[in-house]
Amino acid sequence: MTDRTGTRSASPDARAAALTGPVRTCIGCRGTDSWSALLRVVAGSATVATSDGVSRGSAVPVIVDAEHRLGGRGAWLHPTVACCDHAVRRRAFGRALRVSTAIDVTGVTAYVCGLSHTEIDRPKGTESGFDADERPMSTQQ
């Protein structure tokens, strides 16, 4: 791959990014990562039906799109509590989703907190090929 003038080849980082597929930016830490490592969120509908039949706007809910299939403008976030906290403190959800009204991120924070508890409770076991005493597991009995 060459630059526009055709005189230089692209940097190794640019070539690596082109080979790994789509790269997205986390709205919390502003770091780049593969789309498969990030959590996609979208803005939901802000209208609420009332008893008198008039629809009134309320806070726009931010919905987790775990399957990356929902329509509309999306934002990307590392599924960690730290990145979610950074995004909330920086008010990045509204800017990234281009929503000018109030937003409700409780669903996203609950989802991310649930993921972090799931990862902590997961047994570390023998996933790395080592027993609990840190000796390599034998493949033969």
Image (cartoon, rainbow, N blue to C red):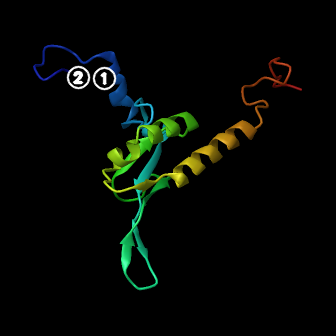
Q: What element carries label 2?
A: loop
Residue closest to the far front? 52
Nearer to the camera, 88 or 20: 88
Mark 1 is surrounded, within 10 Å at the Cα level, by few (under 14), some (14 to 19) or many (20 or more) other residues, namely: few
Residue at left 82%, top 23%?
Answer: 137
At label 2, the amino acid type is: Met
Expressed as whole percent of the image width and height from the top left, the position of residue 13 reads 34, 19
- Image point 69% across, 42% down: which residue? 117
Task: Name, please, the residue furthest toward the left.
Answer: 5
Image marks 1 and 2: residues in contact by CB distance under 8 Å: yes
Between the residue at mark 1 and the residue at mark 2, the CA separation in whole angstroms equals: 9 Å
- In the rendered image, the residue lying farthest to the right is 141
Relative placement, left or right, of 4 versus 58 is left
Q: Name the residue under label 2.
A: 1
Horizontal side of 110 relative to 95 (left or right) equals right
Answer few, some or many: residues within 10 Å of disc 2's Cα (few below 14, many 20 plus, some between 14 and 19).
few
Q: Would you place residue 34 above or below residue 5 in this image?
A: below
Task: Determine the residue positioned at 23% across, 23% down.
Answer: 1
The residue that mark 1 highlights is: 14
Q: Quadrant of the C terminus?
A: top right
For residue 96, the mark is: none
Residue at 37%, 59% in the rendered image: 71
| Rendering coords of residue 97 (x, y %) | 34, 50
Q: Where is residue 19? Give x, y as percent.
A: 36, 29
